Amino acid sequence: MSVTGKEKKTCTAILLAGGQGKRMGTDTQKQYLLIRGYPVLYYSLRTFQQSEIIDDVILVTGSGQTDYVRREFVERYGFSKVSRIVEGGRERYDSVWEGLKAAQDAGIADDSYIFIHDSARPFLTEEILERAYEDVERNRACVVGVPSKDTVKIVDRENFAAETPDRKYVWVIQTPQVFEASLIIEAYGKMMSRETVCATDDAMAVENELHIPVHMTMGSYENIKITTPEDLDIAQIFAQRCFPDLQE
């Protein structure tokens, strides 16, 4: 594969699959809920397995779930790119840090690229991965997102509108978020050494700790996050469109 005409660098995906899914209103964790007969987690693993961009996958699970995931996903479906399965932490950033430490333990090269992706976004495509690869080659740090279709209001503590940013400069952030390995490992190392950690996505670590600009990569409006029961209903439709070869 030649994405940019240069020799391709090694790309490792850190796939986060430890979410609790509290807003789903079900005891089943959202990564194990079924979309057209397949668990949510299956879709991202399938995309990475078939991708020409991704070389290996570090899968980060919930507590006590590594054996289950290895048996029911990696072995059952033959996802041979999964090189390591590790337990995550309480918060998302804890789980990312566990994935990054696993990448370090595996001897990842400083100039490799790390793709951090939430398994709750099952409709990742090869086209998104290619665009992100091209962007990270140019910029060292990029995150996938889409321009906001809606007007956004910034509110004060009493929920009164305080500011209305220009919509043409507002993007809704998705995953994967992609970084040169040395960059994201250094940023997370600094962030996790602090007494108080506040980061809702990986780009914040790079922005706040290293003060390096993060480029926006065009994602897809179908690259939704499964968070509520309504999202799962929409996902049934998207799955039929994005994965027409899969049979229920």
Image: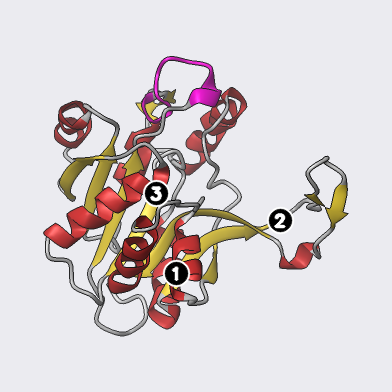
Q: Rate crowding at label 2 as few (under 14), some (14 to 19) or many (20 or more) other CA atoms within 10 Å.
A: some
Mark 1 / mark 3, whichever is N-terminal = 3
Q: Tell me the crowding category of disc 3: few under 14, some 14 to 19, or many 20 or more residues within 10 angstroms, Cα based.
A: many
Q: Which mark is residue 93?
A: 3
Kindly state the secondary structure of the residue where label 2 is placed: loop
Q: From the image, which quarter does the C terminus lie in?
A: top left
Estimate the x, y position of residue 219 in percent, counting from the top left: 54, 58
Secondary structure type for disc 3 = helix
Identify residue type, mark 2.
Answer: Ser
* In the foreground, 99 or 79: 99
The relative height of residue 226 versus residue 133 in the rendered view (above or below) is above
Going 18% across and 62% down the picture, which residue do you hit? Answer: 104
Does 137 lie within the magenta span? no
Residue picked out by circle 2 = 148
Nearer-N-terminus badge (2/1): 2
187 left or right of 75? right
What residue is rendered at 37% in x and 68% in y? Answer: 179
Q: Amino acid at mark 1?
A: Glu
Query: Residue placed farthest to the bottom in the image?
Result: 6
Q: Amino acid at mark 3?
A: Tyr
The one nearer the camera, 18 or 77, is 18
Q: How is the image coloured?
A: secondary structure
Question: Residue 77 lies in what quarter of the image?
Answer: top left
User: From the viewer's perspective, is residue 13 above or below residue 24?
Assistant: below
If the image is split into quadrants, where does the N terminus sit?
A: bottom left
- Residue at x 41%, y 23% (from the top left corner): 34
Residue tagged by mark 1? 209
Find residue 23 and report its image quarter: top right
User: As rendered, which of 173 and 64 lies closer to the eye?
Assistant: 64
